Image (cartoon, rainbow, N blue to C red):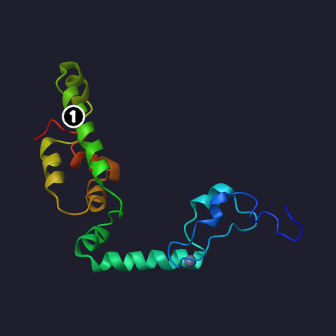
Amino acid sequence: MTPGQAPGVGMCSPTSAERTCIRCGRLLERMINEKPYLFRQRNYCSSLCRNRANSEQKAALWRDPIARERFQRGIHQNQFTTDHQQSILRMRTIMLERWQNPQYVQRMQGRRRLTAEQIKAIRADTRSIRAISRDYGLSYAAIHKICKRLTYCEIE
Ligand SMILES: [Zn+2]
């Protein structure tokens, strides 16, 4: 550390010279006592910039009808991406294969909490997953898995 320099500033991260705030373009500087790994993850110059960028993003979402619909249903912006859909498809294939095994079928049928009619009703429900889960007293994940046919995949 050179004399007169604040401790913790410019000591490491050679990337600090190149990186700028993704909103205002100001050069990012590592703050005193800021952990290097946190600095590397940081994209904005200040919390003010970060908060403004977040609200600008929300406003942009609101203007887009598809994004707005998702937003209103409480679906996260990055939820159900292509990767996610592919992993769901993979999982569903595995589950359907398991259901070919009679032993597995026997074991699972004893643990069934919902009837086929209830499953069909849940899948046909157009409300949000959160609203359905509240109605049935089940968790968000349980309803999500039913709707994505990861559980009760033998029905329909
Ligand atoms: Zn900024």
The foreground one among 96 and 25 is 25
Q: Quadrant of residue 114?
A: top left
Q: Position of residue 43 (x, y in %)?
A: 55, 67
Which residue sits furthest right?
3
Mark 1 surroundings within 10 Å by alpha-carbon count, few (fewer than 14), some (14 through 19), many (20 or more): some
* Residue matched to label 1: 93
Q: Is residue 78 above or below residue 109?
A: below
Q: How many marks?
A: 1
Q: Position of residue 39 (x, y in %)?
A: 63, 61
Which residue sits furthest top?
103
Using residue 146 as the reference point, say whether residue 55 is left or right of it: right
Q: What's the residue at 23%, 47% (across, down)?
A: 148
Q: Is residue 40 above or below residue 116?
A: below
Q: Quadrant of the N terminus?
A: bottom right
- The answer to whether residue 34 of the structure is visible from this angle is yes
- The answer to whether residue 113 of the structure is visible from this angle is no
Q: Quadrant of residue 70?
A: bottom left
Using residue 59 as the reference point, say whether residue 124 is left or right of it: left
Q: Is mark 1 within 8 Å of ligand 1?
A: no
Q: What's the residue at 23%, 46% (across, down)?
A: 146
Q: Position of residue 132 (x, y in %)?
A: 25, 58
Q: What's the residue at 29%, 55% (across, down)?
A: 133
Using residue 29 as the reference point, say whether residue 129 is left or right of it: left
Amino acid tagged 1: Thr
Q: Quadrant of ligand 1?
A: bottom right
Q: What's the residue at 33%, 53% (across, down)?
A: 140
Looking at the rendered structure, the secondary structure element under dot 1 is helix
Using residue 57 as the reference point, say whether residue 142 is left or right of it: left
The foreground one among 44 and 2 is 2
Q: Position of residue 57 (x, y in %)?
A: 40, 75
Which residue sits furthest left?
156
